[in-house]
Amino acid sequence: MNAMKVRNLVIFLGTLFSANALAGPADYVYTPIVEHGEKEIDFKFGTAENPAGTTKEVASLGYGYGATEYWFTEIYLKTESVDSEPRLNILEWENKFQLTESGKYPLEVGLITEFEFPLNNEEEPNEFKIGPLFQTDIDKVQLNANLLLESTFNGPVETEHEIVSQYQWQGKYRWKKEFEFGVQGFGELGEWNDWLPQDEQEHKIGPAAFGVIGVGDRKIIKYNFAWLSGMTDATPDDTFRLQAEFEF
């Protein structure tokens, strides 16, 4: 398959799964499953060179808890930097709801909600994200696709009430619990009712790895990372993202 066909395939998948929180380099693919009673310390990092030549880095540290069989809640402190610009610190509150009973149906369905509150820049708006989460398994292959909408509030007037659309997806092969491999894709299309021209949209795709490090049957650290390549001029050429969860 030549490069043009691959690019068109990614654009098609983006349209199929679409729905935009502005995808940052540390963003990860949400999954709909909730484990009641699970506690975790969650670290995320991402870096990307923007088309303008600047480098954006994002890192966050959070604490999460499976409060019920269907609700997982997590609080993050996140920091963003773009070259020499002042660093932006953000408080983030994420809630995930599992809407189907695990294993009962071929398709697992969940819902994600997320609030972001900038802590050190009054010019930056707050953000709210919401969207459905989907997961299915085919033998040893797990497939995920998520549709997300994001809106800003309590910011400059020109950013109020914009609703933008984003998609994310992944496929992974469960080779062994210590190491699984697959592919991830992220993209953003512009406002939900007024998509950007194709060359101004963001679409990125790349190989990913997943795994669990533990002792016996007890999980200690769950990790995943990906190297993503941009498929349009508006997308960073290369994005590296990493997530590590310490579960207890």
Image (cartoon, rainbow, N blue to C red):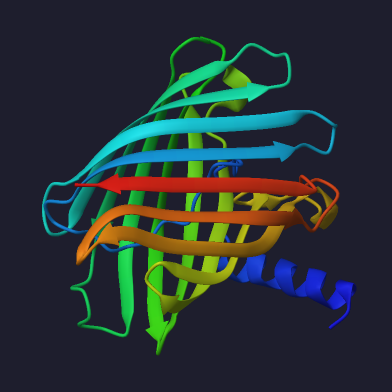
In which quadrant of the rendered view does residue 169 lie? bottom right
Residue 163 coordinates in the image, percent (x, y): 54, 42
228 versus 27 height, above or below: below
Q: Which residue does the image show at 81% across and 45% down from the upper left?
A: 234
Horizontally, is 89 left or right of 178 in the view? right
For this orientation, the residue located farthest to the front is 215
Q: Which residue does the image show at 22% across and 49% down from the upper left?
A: 72
Count of marks placed on residues: 0
Residue 178 coordinates in the image, percent (x, y): 40, 67
Comparing 14 with 60, the one in front is 60
In which quadrant of the rendered view does residue 65 lie? top left
Q: Is residue 20 visible?
A: no
In which quadrant of the rendered view does residue 19 lie? bottom right
Q: Which residue does the image show at 79% across and 58% down from the upper left?
A: 231
Horizontally, is 126 left or right of 6 in the view? left
Comparing 99 with 62, the one in front is 62
Q: Which quarter of the image is occupied by the N terminus?
A: bottom right
19 versus 60 height, above or below: below
Q: Which residue does the image show at 57% across and 36% down from the upper left?
A: 162
